[in-house]
Amino acid sequence: GAVVSQHPSWVICKSGTSVKIECRSLDFQATTMFWYRQFPKQSLMLMATSNEGSKATYEQGVEKDKFLINHASLTLSTLTVTSAHPEDSSFYICSARDGLMNTEAFFGQGTRLTVV
Amino acid sequence: GIQVEQSPPDLILQEGANSTLRCNFSDSVNNLQWFHQNPWGQLINLFYIPSGTKQNGRLSATTVATERYSLLYISSSQTTDSGVYFCAVDAGGGADGLTFGKGTHLIIQP
């Protein structure tokens, strides 16, 4: 299957600082990538859809000024958590599809963010 | 939006047992996938199965799209099968993200 790589795997940052998470499609091009968040013992929730060359679309309740998304190329999307606070501590995971419609989604390894 | 319900929420079995996990969804879907989340959080793709039946080793899955449900079968369970199994669907096209169920937490005891 297609490979999606996410970096870093884990990060600890101080409250008030910003953290950038990278998501790369290694062996295919992805015009659209997706960012999810998972709190402990809960399911994955879609946060936003990252569109190459255009603005991201955010799910209801997700602050676009706090979670900045940049999709600068067909193989890279980044999520920046700005002015992080302890309540932003979570597992963030990205996804991409190899193809345009109705194809299998593959996920990165995820990033565990802890804000202290 | 589309609703996804998984059952049972928790399942404890002895090694060697068989199990059936269920996923119900509230609307027509273009994509349905089953995942296994390992202890490190990574999602392992098990099946991409918007309809029909597929098998991969000890695992198999069936989706009856007209009745809006999917089943994941695990036979001869091993301790390494433990973890959380998620069903996720996409009611739109490739531009939509997946909607996940709450998962089934499976524990296989030796």
Image (cartoon, coloured by chain):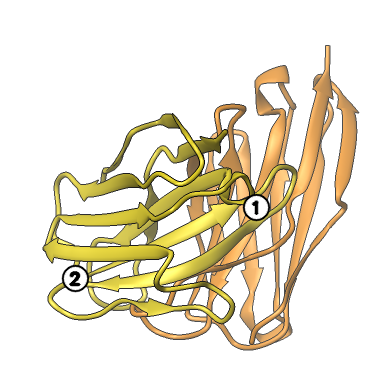
Chain colours: A yellow, B orange
x then y, percent, for residue A78 = 26, 55
What residue is drawn where x is 37% and y is 56%?
A95
Seen in the image, is B31 located left or right of residue B1?
Answer: left
Where on the picture, by quarter, is residue B1? bottom right
User: Is residue B42 in view from this perspective?
Assistant: no
Chain to which mark 2 belongs: A
| Residue assigned mark 2 | A31
Please say if B39 is above or below B10. Answer: above
Query: How far apart in space, not on screen, are marks 1 and 2 (Cα)?
Result: 25 Å
x then y, percent, for residue B15 = 82, 19
| Residue assigned mark 1 | B86
Disc 1 marks a residue whose amino acid type is: Phe
Badge nearest the viewer, 1 or 2: 2
Disc 2 marks a residue whose amino acid type is: Thr
Where on the picture, by quarter, is residue A114? top right
Chain to which mark 1 belongs: B
User: Is residue B80 in view from this perspective?
Assistant: yes
Seen in the image, is B82 located left or right of residue B63?
Answer: right
x then y, percent, for residue B71 = 71, 59
Please tell me the numbered disc located at residue A55: none
What residue is drawn where x is 22% and y is 68%?
A99
x then y, percent, for residue A41 = 75, 44
Seen in the image, is B7 located left or right of residue A105?
Answer: right
